[in-house]
Amino acid sequence: MTRSPGEDNRKQPEQESMGKAFAILGAGFSIVVSSLAGMALGSYLDRGGQGHLFAALGFLLGLLAGFHRAYLLIRSITWKRQRL
């Protein structure tokens, strides 16, 4: 099947917006997954003690790492848009 030249131009913005949507979705998942991974690692370290200090610290460190990753993803999207 043959496509007209104008048809390809219409699909590029749609594919670009889908890529941005998946990047933003990935940013959200990175926050959640890194927070849970940090809490799981902290809980593993806390298994012998009575407190939950390492679980809380692991959660906070994972949360910080997730926000950092989300920031980098969103910054790369906006930087590409400004560059074009």
Image: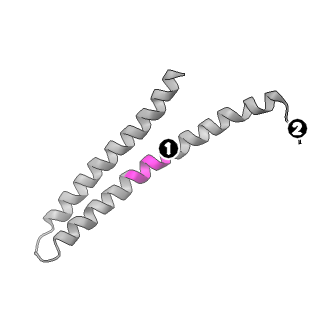
Q: How far from the left and from the top, in percent, is residue 11?
A: 72, 35
Question: Callout 1: few (<14), some (14-19), or many (20+) C-alpha neighbours within 10 Å?
Answer: some
Q: Quadrant of the N terminus?
A: top right
* Residue at image point 23% right, 54% down: 60
* Residue at image point 60% right, 42% down: 18
Rendered view: 14 above or below 5? below
Q: Which mark is residue 72?
A: none
In this view, the residue farthest toward the right is 1
Per the image, the residue denoted by label 1 is 23
Highlighted magenta segment, given as a residue range: 23-30
User: Quick one: label 1 or label 2, which is nearer the N terminus?
Assistant: 2
Rendered view: 33 above or below 17? below
Q: How far from the left and from the top, in percent, is residue 31?
A: 36, 51
In this view, the residue farthest toward the front is 2
Per the image, the residue denoted by label 2 is 2
Q: Is residue 26 a member of the stretch shown in magenta?
A: yes
Q: Quadrant of residue 45?
A: bottom left
Q: CA distance from mark 1 to mark 2?
A: 32 Å
* Residue at image point 55% right, 22% down: 84
